[in-house]
Image (cartoon, grey):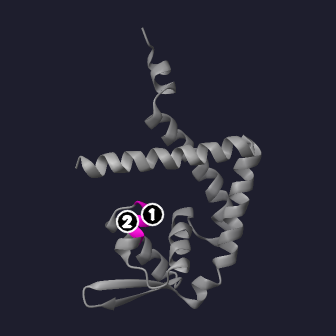
Amino acid sequence: METEENFLESCLFFNTNTLSRYLLKLAEKEFKHLNLSPAHASLLLWVYDDPGISPKQLSQKLHLTPSTITRFVDALEKKALVTRKAKGKSAFISPSKKGLELKVPIAIAYKKLYLTYTKILGAEIANQLSFSILKTHQKLADYLDRNE
């Protein structure tokens, strides 16, 4: 008979959530000096790559709900890091001048994060794990899209 501990050790949901919490701690450490959460930094990366991006596009790219995107944009707008321009019922998000000043520091913080977890895990394991997680979330997203 399988024990509860053994079940959790083999549970993808449990293990990915645990992994996520540890990675978040590492990421928060790297982004703390920017006074920016890793999630907000991720949104900014998409805004840098596609100025004038819509909240709907951000929601799709970041795999977050529209209400979460709205909260993130509100917070970044309050910090004067993005601008939101309304056109009819649509909104378009662009980096502000102040936001653009963080582009390089955000890239450096992500690079330091990558180097930290790669040093801990080893490059081969870190890269294999990242690719496996990407493939896994794509399969789960496809399944959910077909079955909702």
Q: Looking at the image, is mark 1 or mark 2 earlier in the sequence?
A: 1
Q: What element carries label 1?
A: helix
CB within 8 Å, label 1 to label 2: no
Task: Say which quarter of the image contains residue 101.
Answer: bottom right
Residue 56: image location, x then y, percent: 34, 72
* Side of 2 relative to 98 (left or right): left
* Side of 123 relative to 80 (left or right): right
Q: Which residue is drawn at 77% across and 47% down?
A: 119
Task: Say which quarter of the image contains residue 52.
Answer: bottom left
**Viewer-side label of 1, 2:** 1
- State yes or no: residue 94 in magenta: no
Tell me the kind of residue under disc 1: Leu
Q: Which residue is drawn at 51% across and 35% down?
A: 15
Q: Is the magenta stretch mostly helix, strand or loop?
A: helix
Q: Mark 1 points at which residue?
A: 62
* Side of 12 relative to 120 (left or right): left
The alpha-carbon separation of the residues under discs 1 and 2 comes to 10 Å
- State yes or no: residue 59 in magenta: yes
Q: What element carries label 2?
A: helix
Q: Which range is magenta? A: 58-63
Residue 59, compared with residue 93, is above or below; it is above
Q: Mark 2 points at which residue?
A: 68
Tell me the kind of residue under disc 2: Thr
From the viewer's side, name the closer residue of 133 and 121.
Answer: 133
Quarter of the image containing the N terminus?
A: top left
